[in-house]
Structure formats: C-alpha cells, structure tokens
Image (cartoon, grey):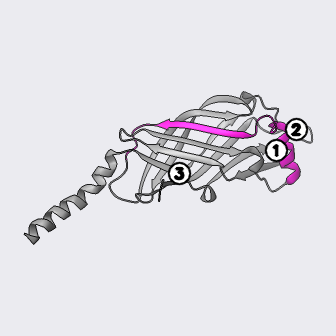
Amino acid sequence: MIVRRLALLTTLLLSVPALAQGGTKTYALKKDASTLTYKLHHPAHEVVGTAKPSDGKALLKADGTLQVAVRANIKDFDSGNANRDQHMWEVTEVAKHPIVDFKGVATGVKLPATFPSKVQVTLKGQLLFHGEKQGVEVPVTVLFKSATEVTTEGSFTISLEQFKLERPSLLMVKVDDKLVLEPKLVFVVEGT
C-alpha cells in the first residue's frame, strides 16, 4: 500500500511541470531590476540614456503566444548630463507626450520543462513614441531562469524622423536618424 502511494505521488510530482505548461502564466515586471536604454550617435560622441520602466506585464498562453507590454516615462531617462536630458525633453515634447510604450506578440514560446532555458523570439508590435505609433520588430533573448522568473534582452533601431522628431544637433551637426533601444527586462510570475 505504501509503495502504491509513493508511486502515485511520484507520478503526480513528475506531471506538475507538464500541467504548468498547459495553463496561462501572467508575469509582472520587476521595475527595479529592469532597464530601458537608448543610444544616439553624433560625430562628436555617443549619447546613452537609461530609465527604469514605469510599468510592464507579460502573458504566456498555453498555445505558445507571448504578449508583452512595457512603458516608461520620458523624463526618467538619464544620460548623465542634465542639460542634454532637458534638451531631449524639449525635442520629444515631453509635456505633450510623456511616455514611450511598447506592446508586442511572439508565437511558439513554451514554458520549458527544465531551467534555466533560453529561447530567441521576435516580438512584433507597436511602439508609441512622441505621439506616433509605428510597427516594430524586436528580436529578444528570453531566459527562463526558473519556473517563476524570466529575463529578456533585446536591441532594435528606430528612425527619429519616422516618429516625427526633430533630430537634436550639436555644433550645427545633427545626431544620426537612428535611435537604438535596448530593453533588459525581468519578469516574475504574479503572486510570487
């Protein structure tokens, strides 16, 4: 009888990861552990600004669909130079457009049976910046560190002019039109 119960218990314990894969998991963003970084190039120097996201969630559905939403306040980006940041606020019209917001979807993402486990995906979605919405594709590395924690890292480029932004200039030379965005995000299963 004891052997039978142990066998049943062992079977149930081994099936838990498979059962977990069948449901939807909702992840909350760990804001303090996450960063959003932008990089702008000017012939005289490169500008790098970093902010903590203000909000974010991820949803991993049983069918392998991954949905991600992340937002940040423009005023939270810090380049280490207060004058430069003030100028960026003017250029981005932060009073009218205070946030940058991304919502994207990837398919074919499954909760792994063992941890850590890494997968490469491309999030296809919309970036709201300077009051303009544009379609973007964000290649990201998703690292399932455990059954309750996931990190993502990626890099993608947008055109400032496409978002109707006047390119900042220094010594009458404008920065490049390309703005590189690098999200490094940490998510945990809600309720953990």
Asked if marks 1 and 2 touch (Cβ < 8 Å), the reply is: yes
- Highlighted range, magenta: 82-110
Contact flag, marks 3 and 1 (Cβ < 8 Å): no
Marker disc for residue 173: 2
First of labels 3, 2 by sequence position: 3
Density class for disc 3 (Cα within 10 Å; few <14, some 14-19, many ≥20) is some
Q: Position of residue 111 (x, y in %)?
A: 37, 49
Q: In the drawing, what numbered circle is on residue 28? A: 3
- SS type, badge 3: strand
Tell me which numbered mark, 3 or 1, is placed earlier along the sequence: 3
Residue under circle 1? Answer: 43
Residue at 49% x, 50% y: name it: 27
Q: Earlier in the sequence, mark 1 or mark 2?
A: 1
Which residue is at the front of the view, 85 or 54?
54
The residue at the point 92 percent across, 38 percent down is 172
Q: Could you tell me how many numbered marks the image carries?
A: 3
For label 1, count other residues whose C-alpha is less than 10 Å away and answer few (under 14), some (14-19) or many (20+). Answer: few
Identify the amino acid type marked 3: Ala
Check disc 1 and give the amino acid type.
Pro
